[in-house]
Amino acid sequence: MSTVATWNIDPMHSVVEFKVKHLVISTVTGKFRNFEGKLETASEDFDGAKAHFSLSVDSIDTNVADRDAHLKSDDFFAADRFPNITFDGVLNKGGDGDYALVGHLTIRDITKEVALEVSYGGVMVDGYGQTKAGFEIEGKISRKEFGLQWNMVTEAGGVVVSDQVKLNLNVQLVKVG
């Protein structure tokens, strides 16, 4: 019988970012500052690890306070009613050494299955004797599929905010047991 190891996200050495096209000509980048998560695995190479992740919508930061307030409003995340975005899934190793993270993402009150690409950076023991693992996670989602419908049409007929949102997480985990 395998022993299950738990790895918690180290928020001081991790970042959760998103990118979305604005007016179809430029990209707005934002991040969430407060999040937590873990992997539970019985495998040294993390294959089959169970992933649990949650972030605080109220911690959104696009470097523009008015835009952040709009994103927290009912037009987008409705942070007062849906304070967290959650993900539960499984990390599966592919034949090329990379991984796929497949699971259920919940935004607002809508849950959809998503598949994210994962690059494994390796395992290292830090100067304090803690065992750390690093991962880069990327993917794309449709914001409209999660009820984030708000948009405006410009005079030229273009849209203000694209439907596609790119996700980019750089995650360092610390082994806790």
Image (tube, rainbow, N blue to C red):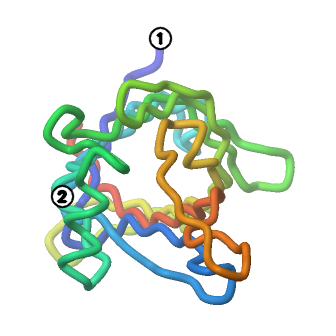
Residue 102, horizontal then vertical, whole percent = 62, 34
User: Mark 2 sits on what residue?
Assistant: 34
What residue is at 59 percent from the left and 64 percent from the top? 166
The answer to whether residue 166 is above or below residue 26 is above
Observer-nearest of 113 and 118: 113
Mark 2 or mark 1, whichever is nearer to me: 2
Looking at the image, the residue that sits furthest to the right is 95
Residue kind at label 2, given as amino acid type: Asn
Residue kind at label 1, given as amino acid type: Met
Q: In this view, does 159 lie to the left or right of 20?
A: right
Q: Quadrant of the C terminus?
A: top left
Q: Quadrant of residue 34?
A: bottom left
Numbered marks: total: 2
The Cα atoms of the two marked residues, 2 and 1, are separated by 36 Å
Residue 33, horizontal then vertical, whole percent = 21, 66
Q: Which of marks 2 and 1 is nearer the N terminus?
A: 1
User: Mark 1 sits on what residue?
Assistant: 1
Helix, strand or loop at mark 1: loop
Residue 64, horizontal then vertical, whole percent = 25, 83
